Image (spheres, grey):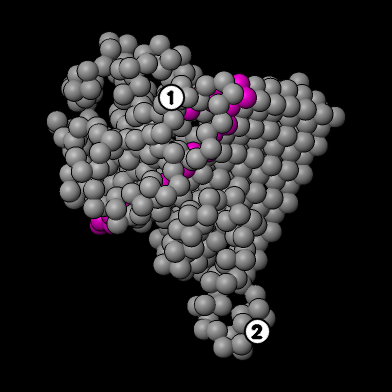
Amino acid sequence: MKKELNEQFIKDLSKKKNEPEWMLEFRLKSFEKFKELDQPTFGPKLDIDFDKINYYKSNDEKLTNDWDKVNCSIRNTFKDLGVIDAENKYLGGVTNQFESEVVYHNQEFADQGIIFTSTDDALQKHPDLFKEYFNHLVNYAENKYTALNGALWSGGSFIYIPKGVKVDRPLQSYFRIETESLGQFERTIIIVDEGADLSYIEGCTAKNYSSSSLHAGVVEIYIKKNGHCRYSTIQNWSTDVYNLVTKRAIVYDNGLMEWVDGNIGSKVTMKYPSCVLAGEGATGNSISIAYAKEGQQLDAGAKMIHLAPNTKSNIVSKSIAEAGGVSNYRGLTKISKKATNSKATIKCDTILMDNISKSDTFPTNIVGNNTSTLEHEATISKVSAEKLFYLTSKGLSEDTAKELLIMGFISDFKKELPMEYAVELNRLLKE
């Protein structure tokens, strides 16, 4: 397919995927909006040369549930990442995306009525359900990158959990970029029906190159009455990846949405997982960590929108900056006039490892009635010289002492991760 991004490119992409006419029309409409919209006016500067991005790369692999049928080099990549071992040990289903397409998918729960497949596959096999939820929570016209995703989306996960079904083992998707200057635009849709329960894990990595890649995913999650979803992410993109993702959940009566978000890599990250608390008694939680090193700007946080009475939200943000990295919190908490007797808490903690790193907090907090409460606490501190001295005096090296202090700083975040992912986080932080 042509590298240049134009209408013909999009028509060829849609034809290759054998999509219905309405999806082609949606893609073209999104492309026109992408050309109209400017870059975001907040956050890090985005210096992306759109003429140099490879917008789609097919690996010519047929979707399979047998690793032996996956290309050997691709299979070895996922094996080296520990994905295959994790599947065998503790996951109830996996979807693995390599470049622009899902290459491997497997699940255990089909007999319970659960749908877990790639989003492309869902469009073909479950067209009515797909159309009911696609683009209804994150609109293509929201910003330049939701529009770009709308035009080019490929891969991602589609999950439907039926009423009352509780998935006792996590489902996982893993996204890998191997090609230089690649754009990856997965689309994930999750529907948790009434009284259902889901734990979902997302992993992201990429090879390091001299030129930049772009990851602009979109996630839409629907939590019905008394439903529960936990969405855990460990993102370790290489330092040449622009990670610009829109993630949003809508939560109905007494439902619970939990974002557990780890941002370790990338050149620039702009990501603010959101909850729209639309039903009475709905709850949204977000706990995140952002660790920025040299040449990295991580602009992360969360958004909580209270629309109904007796709703609750809790944001915990942990930021670490080292070697000149920039790690910022940016968030929005809004309690509407109708969301009476609601409660919101925000806690932002930052630790600076040296004198050349930076961190700022950019909160927007709005309370629209006098029966609700909102609490916001923020702290920024440097690594304690006294604690470092104490630990080094006990025989630890300075690097080991700093590692211990960091692990203690993020202990709340680690508690929220499945054990295997907590181990992986430890390894990433040590590296």
Q: Is residue 216 visible?
A: no
Q: List the residue tagged with mark 2.
A: 390
Write down the quadrant of residue 159 in the picture.
top left
Quick one: SS at disc 1?
helix
Write down the quadrant of residue 354 in the picture.
bottom right
Q: Residue at x 61, y 43 (%)?
A: 286
| The residue positioned farthest toward the front in the image shown | 111
Q: Residue at x 31, y 25 (%)?
A: 120
Q: Estimate the x, y position of residue 49 in percent, counting from the top left.
A: 28, 43
**How many numbered callouts?**
2
- Look at the image and say whether residue 205 sits in the magenta stretch: yes
Vertically, is 323 above or below 36?
A: below
Badge 1 amino acid = Asp
Q: Residues within 10 Å of mark 1 (few under 14, many from 20)?
A: few
Q: List the residue tagged with mark 1.
A: 111
Q: Residue at x 80, y 25 (%)?
A: 340
Question: Taking 182 as reference, is 395 left or right?
Answer: right
Q: In which quadrant is the C terminus drawn?
A: bottom left
How far apart are the two marked residues, 2 and 1, measured between alpha carbons? 57 Å
Q: Is residue 317 visible?
A: yes
Vertically, is 429 above or below 131?
A: below
Q: In which quadrant is the N terminus drawn?
A: top left
Badge 2 amino acid = Tyr
Quick one: SS at disc 2?
helix
Q: Residue at x 57, y 67 (%)?
A: 406
Q: Estimate the x, y position of residue 307 in percent, counting from the top left.
A: 69, 24
Magenta range is: 186-210
Question: Taking 76 as reference, is 33 left or right?
Answer: right
Q: Earlier in the sequence, mark 2 or mark 1?
A: 1
Q: Residues within 10 Å of mark 2 (few under 14, many from 20)?
A: few
Vertically, is 110 above or below 234?
A: above
Nearest-to-viewer mark from 2 and 1: 1
